[in-house]
Image (cartoon, grey):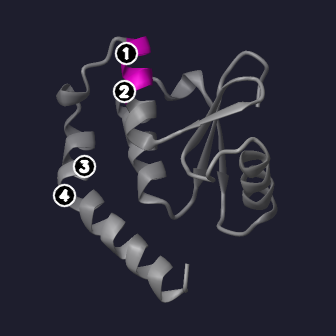
Amino acid sequence: MSATRPGIFLKKTCPYCLKLRIFLTEAGLADRFDFTVFTEGDEMHRALRARMEAAGQKPSFPAAQIEPGRLHTGSDDLIARFAAEGGVDVAALPLLRYYSDGVFPRHVEMHAELKRLKGG
C-alpha cells in the first residue's frame, strides 16, 4: 500500500467486496487505490481481523484504509463516500446496477447459507 493512496482490502469470495470493486472499476476510480485481495483464514485475513478487533471494530469486509490507523467498512457506505468524492452518479452505472439488482442478492443468500452451514 502506498503512502498516498488509500488501501482497499477485499476478501476473494465476498459478494460485498465484489460490489465495491465493480463500483470502483466502472466509475473509473480504481486507479486511486491500492488493492489487497485475501482468502478467508489466510495470514492477511487473520491480521486484519485482529487489527479490527483491537480497535473495537467488528471485523467486516470490504475495508478501506483511508487515513492511517483506521479501517472503514460497509460496501454501501464506501460506495457512497467514494461516489461523492469522485463526483459519480451511482445510478448511472449499469454494471453495478445489474450486479446489485440481480446476482448480488443471490450471492448474499449463498454466502449466509455457507456461513450458517459452517457453524459461523
In the rendered image, the quadrant that contains the C terminus is bottom right
Q: Is residue 57 above or below residue 87?
A: below
Do the numbered discs 2 and 1 sit on residues whose CB atoms are within 8 Å?
yes
Q: Quadrant of residue 104?
A: bottom left
Instruction: Judge whether residue 28 can be spotted in this image.
Output: no
Q: Which residue is mark 4?
A: 102
Distance of label 4 from label 3 (alpha carbons) = 6 Å
Cβ–Cβ below 8 Å for labels 3 and 2? no
User: What residue do we see at 73% from left, 15% from top?
Assistant: 4
Task: Identify which amino acid the numbered label 2 is placed on.
Answer: Ala
Which residue corresponds to the image point at 47% horizontal and 42% vertical from the top-left?
74
Q: Are marks 4 and 3 in contact (CB under 8 Å)?
A: yes
The reply to whether residue 106 is visible in this rendering is: yes
Closer mark to the observer between disc 2 and disc 4: 2
Magenta residues (range): 80-86
Disc 3 element: helix
- The front one of 71 and 38 is 71
Residue appearing at x 46%, y 23% in the figure:
29
Task: Residue type at mark 3: give it.
Answer: Ser
* Residue position for label 3: 100
- Residue 24: in magenta span: no
Measure the alpha-carbon separation of dots 2 and 4: 20 Å
- The circle on residue 80 is 2
Residue bearing mark 1: 84
